[in-house]
Image: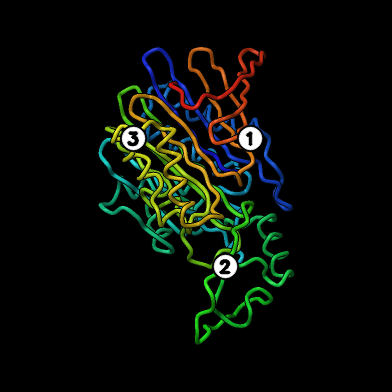
Amino acid sequence: MFELAVIEWHADCLHILQTMSKYYKRPSVPRQPRQSYLTIAISAWAVLQSGGSALDAVEKGCDRCQKEQCDGSVGYGGSPDENGETTLDAMIMNGNTMEVGAVANLKRIKNAIGVARAVMERTQHTMLVGESATVFAENMGFIGEDLTTVKSLDIFTQWMKGSCQPNYRKNVFPNPSKSCRPYKRLAELGPKKRLSTNIRSHDTIGMIAFDQDGHLAVGTSTNGLTHKVPGRVGDSPIVGAGAYADISAGAAAATGDGDVMMRFLPSYLAVELMRAGTDPSAACETAISRIKRHYADFFGAIICANATGHYACNKVPGLLQFHYMVSDGVEVAAVVGSQLEHGPHHASFAVVTGGKVQVGPLEKHKTL
């Protein structure tokens, strides 16, 4: 499950656009019903409706996803690493002050987005990592607890029984395509060959919010790549990669192969393109296509929203669906759609208001 959300305020009502790429069918992680994603959007929207800030809305929405273990890709009990441990990455950014808080490889703390905000508001740093991030979190009042669940333990156990396949090792022995660790380095590097990342093995929630006071915020949260090498950090907590916001230009959030994406800072690129006058649709497309020029097999998606309220999304063909939601503060309506393989800007959607459903196309870019 890839989930992105745009929450935007206008004078007459509040809106939420919540976007998800694909309901992945994981063998050991049951598909979560669509309604649960709607509750995540609604929980963030409710914060804005009650006068809360964009930062509050982003934190609330991401934390709701963490608690509900969105498709196993966010929060505790998912994506165990080579040790069978679940660790979390998260980031939150204030698009008005350019302050950022992030955590990576966070252990034994469920509320990663909350800790990220504490880093932003309680320290002069931008990111804390690993065990030290956990100690900081506990000092700030977050509860330490085991993030392992029966499901994550089963994923790890089955992986071990399958000779630790897939894994993300290279240029080591014994042969990582046939054997489990411990590994040792080979004297010489082999041919450059990148393992195709399983699109079911990881994902992210990303949220963008504008509030009634003109404040902009973005946030991300994930439990990373399943079977990752312990200590691995993906793109989600990296400023400009997982998300980026600047009130003078707009915001973007992305998901996909994080080890590749962080090399291109697609969210930062998209925001800078919008600053230069590029519409959100073209900005999203350029950010993705730049990665594709170097990594033809790359998969991922990005959503962009500019300062005037236009938004768009773009994905590569490997993501079969691209879901979104819009909740209107006046009608309390919701839009739930799925973008198919017809192209990056074509989708169907359903508008649900008072039990009625309307269906139509998603425009190339829209204003909330």
Q: What element carries label 1?
A: loop
Q: Is residue 223 visible?
A: no
The quadrant of the picture occupied by the N terminus is top right
Residue at the image position 37 percent from the left and 35 percent from the top: 55
Q: In this view, does 2 lie above or below 348?
A: below
Q: Name the residue under label 3.
A: 274
Q: Position of residue 184 (x, y in %)?
A: 54, 83
Question: x%, y% of residue 316?
Answer: 55, 44
**SS label for mark 2:** loop
**Mark pair 1, 3: CA separation:** 25 Å
| Residue 131: mark in rendering | none
Image-quadrant location for residue 213: top left
From the image, tell me which residue sits under label 1. 340
Could you say where residue 298 lies in the image, as x and y percent from the top left? 54, 53
For image coordinates 46% across by 49% down, the residue present is 112
Q: Which residue is drawn at 28% across and 35% down?
A: 276
Q: In this view, does 123 lie to the left or right of 66?
A: left
Number of numbered markers: 3
Depicted 191 relative to depicted 312: above or below = below
**Circle nearer the N terminus (1, 3):** 3
Instruction: Give the residue type that dot 2 points to.
Output: Tyr
Q: Which amino acid does label 1 sit on?
A: Leu
Which residue is disc 2 drawn over? 168
- Residue type, label 3: Met
* Residue 53 sits in quarter: top left
Which quadrant of the view contains residue 349? top right
The Cα–Cα distance between marks 1 and 2, rounded to whole angstroms, is 30 Å
Mark in front: 2 vs 3: 3
